Amino acid sequence: MNEEIIITVNNLKTYFYTNQRCNKAVDGVSFKLKRGKTLCMVGESGCGKSVTATSIMRLLPTLARIEEGEIIYHSEEGDIRIDQLAKNGKKMRSLRGSEIAMIFQDPMTALNPVYTVGFQIIESLRYHTKMTKRARRKKAIELLRGMGIPLPEQRVDEFLHQYSGGMRQRAMIAMGMSCNPKVLIADEPTTALDVTIQAQIFDLMNQLKETYKTAIMMITHDMGVVAELADDVVVMYMGNIVESGTVEEVFKTPAHPYTKALLKSIPVLGCGKNQELEPIRGNTPDPYNRPEGCQFNPRCDYCDEKCFEMPNDFKVTGTHHAKCWHYRKVLENE
Amino acid sequence: MLEYITRRTLVLIPMLLIITFLIYAGLELTPGDAVSFMVSPDVLANISPERLEALRESLGLNDPFVIRYFKWLGGVLRGDFGYSLTSGVPISKIVIDRLPATIELSVAALLISTVLGSILGTLSALKKGSMLDHMLTVAGMIGVSIPQFFFGLVAILIFALKLGWLPSGGRMMPGYDSFLDRLPHLVLPAFVLGLTMTAGVMRYARASMLDALNKEFIKTARSKGIPEWRVNFIHGFRVALTPVIVLVGFRLPMLIGGSVIIEQIFQWPGIGKEFVAAVRGQNLPLVMMIALFFVLAVLIASFLVDFFTALLDPRVKLD
Ligand SMILES: Nc1ncnc2c1ncn2[C@@H]1O[C@H](COP(=O)(O)OP(=O)(O)OP(=O)(O)O)[C@@H](O)[C@H]1O
Ligand SMILES: [Mg+2]
C-alpha cells in the first residue's frame, strides 16, 4: 500500500476509432492522485478530460480503447492494474462505486428518471455493503440529510423531476459518497448550477475530503473553482498534460505558455472588473489533423523550430512540471 | 383519477357520434340496400314494385338518411340495438355470441406480439451487430412487409394441411369446449394475426432499447458497480418499455382491422367474420353495431395506453 498516493496514471493513451479514423483523445497522460487531496484537471473543451476520467472508471464507450499505459489503484490489499481488468468484470465492479465513485456533469440526464432518488442511492449500498434493507434505506436518508436536502425522509421517495437542479446534484453526490469511496471523480459537477449552490456543493466536497480522507479528482473549466478547491492542478491540452503542480505553483508561476494564456483568458473571481482578459489566439486544432511536435505550437508566442518536436516533461521544481522547451523563458516572462 | 376518467368519457361521446355518422353515411353511398340481398334475383325480377316498396317501408328503409341515422341512434341509446335485417336475430344476441371469440383471438395476438416483440427486440439491441441481430432485422422487415392473409394461407398450408399439427380453422370441435381443447385452434390464427405486429414491436423495441442504453444514466448505473444484467434490464429495459407500450396501443386498431381478415381465413366465428357478412348483405344495423364496437375498442385502447404510460413513467400524470 502506498501511503501517499491512491491512483497512479502512467503514460495513458486512449484512442477513439470512428469512421476508420483514429482520434488520439488521450495521448500519454501521467499523473498521481494523492489520498485526501483534491486534484483539479483543467483545459479547453475537447482536450480529453472526461476521457481520462472514464478511462480510470473503465466506462469508455465501445469505440474507445486504452492503447497503452497503466492505471494503478493502490488499494489496501496491494496495487491493482485497472487498465488490465475486464471492463465490466467482477473485480472492476467491486471497485466502482465502493472504492472509486464518479459524479457526472448533468444530473438530469445522469440519473434515471423512472426510479426514485432513494432507489438509486440504495442500489450502490445493495451491492457493496452487507446492510439490511431497512439499514440501507436509513443510510440513504442520512446521506441526503448530510447533503443538506430538506425533509430527506420524504425526498428519498421522490423522483428526479421533483428535485431542483441543486438538489439533483446533491443527490448525485450522495449517491457517489454512499459507500465512502477512497476516490471521487467529479466531471464538471457544478457547471449547470448557479454560484451560491456551486459554493455550497464545494463546501460539501471539502467536508467529505476532511471527514473521509477521500481523494477528489475534479474536472472543470473554471479557474475560480480551481483556486478555491485544488491542492494540485494538472493542465491538459489536446490529450496531453502540459503542466502540473500545486495550485500556487501553477497559478503564480505558470511554466507553460498554454497555462499562461488560459489564466489570462479567464476572469478570476475576486480580482475585480479591471482584469485584462486576452482570449487565446487561434483555434483548437482538429483532433484528426494534429500539429507536429508540441500540440500548442500553432497558437504559441514562444514557438520556434525546436517546438516541432514533442517536448519532454521538464522539472521546474520537485512538484512542478511543464511540457515546454521554453519553460524557463515562460517563467521569466520574456 | 376519477376526474380524468370522466373527462375522457365525455370526450368519447362526440367522437363516437361523428364516427358512427360517417360510417352510416359511407354505407348509404354504396349501391343497393338490404332488400336486394334478402330477395333472390329471379324473384326480384318478377315481384311487383308495390310489394317491394311495402317491404322497404316495413324495414324503415324509405325514410331520409339523416332521420334513419337518428332513429338508429335513439334505439342504441335506449339499449335497443335492433334486429339483423337478414336473419331477424336481435343484434345484441349476435354480438354477445360472437364477441368472446374475437376478444380471445385479439388478446392472444396482442400478448404474443407484445411479449415476443419486446423480447426479440431487446435481445437484438443487446447483441447489436451480431448474427442474431442481423437475422432478426431481416425477419422483421419481412414480417412488416408481407400481407397477413398471405401468411395465413401459408400457415394453413404448412401447419394444417402438410404437417397436420394444428386444425386449419374453426374455434372448437363440437362437444370439446374447454379452453385447453380449444387452444390448438387458437394457435395459428393468433400467431398469424400477431405476426405483423410482432415484427413492428420488435423493430421499435430494438430502437427504443438502443436509445435507452445510450443514455447517460446507463453510464451512471455502471459507475455504481452493479451487475450488467441490472444495468441492461432494471435501468435500460425499464426505460425502453414505455415507448413500446405506447406503440402497441397505437397499433391496436391495426390488430382489430387484421382480425376481420384473419377470422375470414381461419373461419373463426368472431365478430369480424360477422362484419364481413353484414357489409356484403347491406345489413346496416349490424354493421353499425360492430363498427361501434371496433371504435370503442380503439378508444379504450388509447385510454389504456395513457394509463400504462402514467404507471410506467413517474413524470407523466393522468390529467
Ligand atoms: N463518445 C465519443 N465518441 C467519439 N469521440 C469522442 C467521444 N467522447 C469523446 N470523444 C473525443 O475525445 C476527445 C476528448 O473528449 P473529452 O470528452 O474528454 O473532452 P473534455 O476535455 O471532457 O471536454 P469538455 O470540457 O467539453 O467536457 C474529443 O476530441 C472528442 O471528440
Ligand atoms: Mg467533459
Image: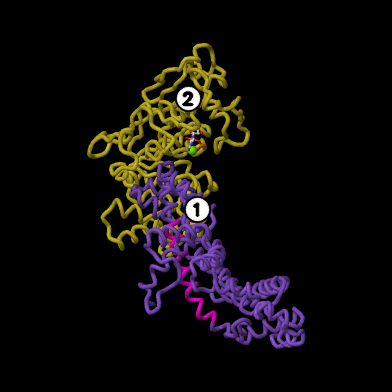
Magenta run includes residue A165: no
Instruction: Give the colour scheme shown.
Output: by chain
User: Which residue in the protein does label 2 denote?
Assistant: A253
Pointer 2 residue Cβ closer than 8 Å to ligand 1: no
Q: Residue at x 35, y 27 (%)?
A: A69
| Residue at the farthest top position | A305
User: Which residue in the protein does label 1 denote?
Assistant: B143
* Residue stretch in magenta: B94-117
> Which chain does the numbered disc 2 sit on?
A
Q: Which residue is drawn at 57% across and 29% down?
A: A264
Query: Who's purple, chain-wise?
Result: B
For the residues bearing labels 1 and 2, Cβ distance under 8 angstroms? no
Residue type for callout 2: Thr
What x and y, as percent, mark residue A116? 43, 59
Pointer 1 residue Cβ closer than 8 Å to ligand 1: no
Magenta run includes residue B115: yes
Q: Which of marks 1 and 2 is in front?
A: 1
Query: Who's yellow, chain-wise?
Result: A
What x and y, as percent, mark residue A308? 50, 15
Kindly indicate the quadrant of the structure image that contains residue A244: top left
